[in-house]
Amino acid sequence: MSNVRMRRAQAAIVALTTGALALTGCSAGAKGSSGDDTRPEAQRAQIAFGDAAASKGPAEPVPGATPGGTIKVYQRDTYAHLDPAQQYVSDMGTLSLLLTRRLTTYHLDNKGKYTVVGDLATDSGQKSDGGKTWTYKLKDGIKFEDGKPITSDDIRHTIERTFADFISSGPTYVQRWLADSTDYRKILKGGPYDGKHLPKTVLDTPDDKTIVFHFKKPVGDLPYALAMAGYGAVEKAKDTKEKYDKAPVSSGPYKIQPGSFKNGKGIVLVKNTQWDPKTDISRHQYVDKFDIQFSVSYPQSTQRLMADNKDNQTAVSFNNQVDAASMLQVANDPKIKARSTSGYQPYVGVMNFNMRRLKDKKVREAIAYAMPTKAILDQYGTPGGGELAGSYISPTLTGYKAIDPYGKMKKPMGDIEKAKKLLKEAGKVGMKLTYAHNTATEPSKYSVAVAANLKAAGFDVQSKELPADTYYDIIGKTDNKFDVYPSAWGADWPSSLTVLPPVYDGRQIQDGGTNYSLYNSPETNKEIDRISQETDQKKAADDWFALGEKILKDDLPQIPTFYYKQIQLHGSKVGGVVNNDIISSVDPTKMFVKK
């Protein structure tokens, strides 16, 4: 896995400062009420890789759906990128489902079951050579918005342009796997421009319908990776390089109304008449138009959607969640609660222990038992803002099991007596402890309880406030002078492959890296390499979880605090609203305007 600083980590600062989550994730339910306070299921079901039959359109009808109408969409943030290859965070991921198709995607059926299916491809991929070779065949009848058929040449171009220097914000998984290196750009410097291509031994297109990926090592998660927004199809003939970011060519059910995208104001999507529903198992085209408005804060969108008057009746937000201050009102008003959806997000909050400074495990255990995780969670809004965590692995991930090795469910406000006992056994009573957090509202509030518990346990606590906008840069320094500090991490798809390697691989320790606890175990590193090449998805999921549990119990580089959740509202005249945990938002492809 890469030591590149992923968008997950950059987005996590948003999670810690505003309660907003910016990336992908999934859980078992398609829709839940805002008052849900249930424990996660015992184990996350394996998401199957669908065959040709599972990938054949059209999508099953949404019950009660009627065509026509306009849905107004309230969004806090302007879309930073429209070029698929530059898209990583979840607001753009939600938008991309309407605009851009890829080789694979996730199908969410009416019963809430997820399957990885062929999107532009006929299936989720044919694996051979022990997982080193993956072959995809394109469907018939797939076109860009200008009517041009989508060919393997376009898909080759889509992949190869991600090697260009100007593509700097999107995912890099496929590129690194193809290059077998984190320095992937060297195998196609500048991208596919000036007639350059990856060799056929790496990426082959033997005919207009076939794409073959050749990897030097087995890859088990390719169908997941190719479903990311960042690998959405780009029409080769219309690629304007940097300018493509403002005017992409659609392959999905909607396209951008020309001239409608205005930074800070909004964007309008209208139907793409070249999209053929018979080729698409996962999307609908019920709505005539999506009128998306930017610069609408969480409290503003919450108040408008709670009011449910005038235009707000046919309004939603794709990504704005209910602000923390309004959660109790939503939960306690049956009429508002009935217009809510809820679900897990892929993030797990943790408190890091600097392994280079806190070398005694008993000291780390004392901190873990003292940590008031409920006080931390409460600042993000309850019910609905999150759920106490016992594991590094989110309930959104395949292989998840409910564990609690440090008793954080039983004593969520901290076990001070146990902490005092451990600190005394370690001979470190009165030990100076530097606790760092950022200056945002939530950490500033919960840090009072954290510091108080650590002092009660016998530590001499020195609190250090860090600026929110550079917080991750500061704790990402390998020589940082802090002992304890919070962070959060979220998966890019429902596999711990996107969690354990970037956070716990000791070979990834460097300034700007994402191994924030500076944890380095040769045994763990070796196991990461082994599981990364496992192509049996269920075995890999079980092995990843077992490794995460072992790291937590045996080494304790962090203590988990809470699993992130969210609640979203919609107007009373919008139907087909379900939570799609893969994209960590409501699903825009099923919505319709009620007549």
Image (cartoon, rainbow, N blue to C red):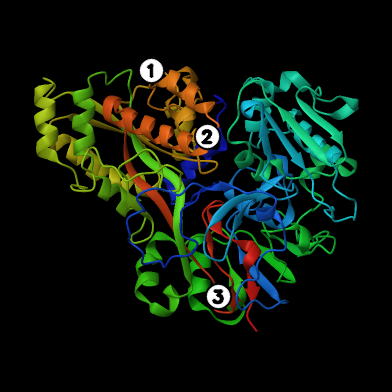
Residue under pointer 3 = 571
Of residues 125 and 585, the one nearer the viewer is 125
Q: Give above or below for 84 relative to 283.
A: above
Report helix, strand or loop for mark 1: helix
The kind of residue tagged 1 is Glu
> For the residues carrying marks 1 and 2, which lies nearer the camera in this image?
2
| Sooner in the amino-acid sequence: mark 2 or mark 3 | 2
Callout 2: 10 Å neighbours few (<14), some, many (20+)? Answer: few
Of residues 119 and 313, the one nearer the viewer is 119
* Whole-number angstrom distance, CA of label 2 to CA of label 3: 43 Å
Callout 3: 10 Å neighbours few (<14), some, many (20+)? Answer: many
* Whole-number angstrom distance, CA of label 1 to CA of label 2: 22 Å
Percent from the top left, x then y, of residue 433? 23, 27
| Sooner in the amino-acid sequence: mark 1 or mark 3 | 1
Is the residue under label 3 in contact with that under label 2 (CB below 8 Å)?
no
Which numbered dot is residue 202? none
Report helix, strand or loop for mark 2: loop
Residue under pointer 1 = 523
Callout 1: 10 Å neighbours few (<14), some, many (20+)? Answer: few
The kind of residue tagged 3 is Gly
Residue at position x 39%, y 43% in the image: 400
Residue at position x 62%, y 32% in the image: 173
Is the residue under label 2 in contact with that under label 1 (CB below 8 Å)?
no
| Sooner in the amino-acid sequence: mark 1 or mark 2 | 1
Residue at position x 72%, y 46% in the image: 102
Residue under pointer 2 = 536
Quarter of the view holding residue 244: top right
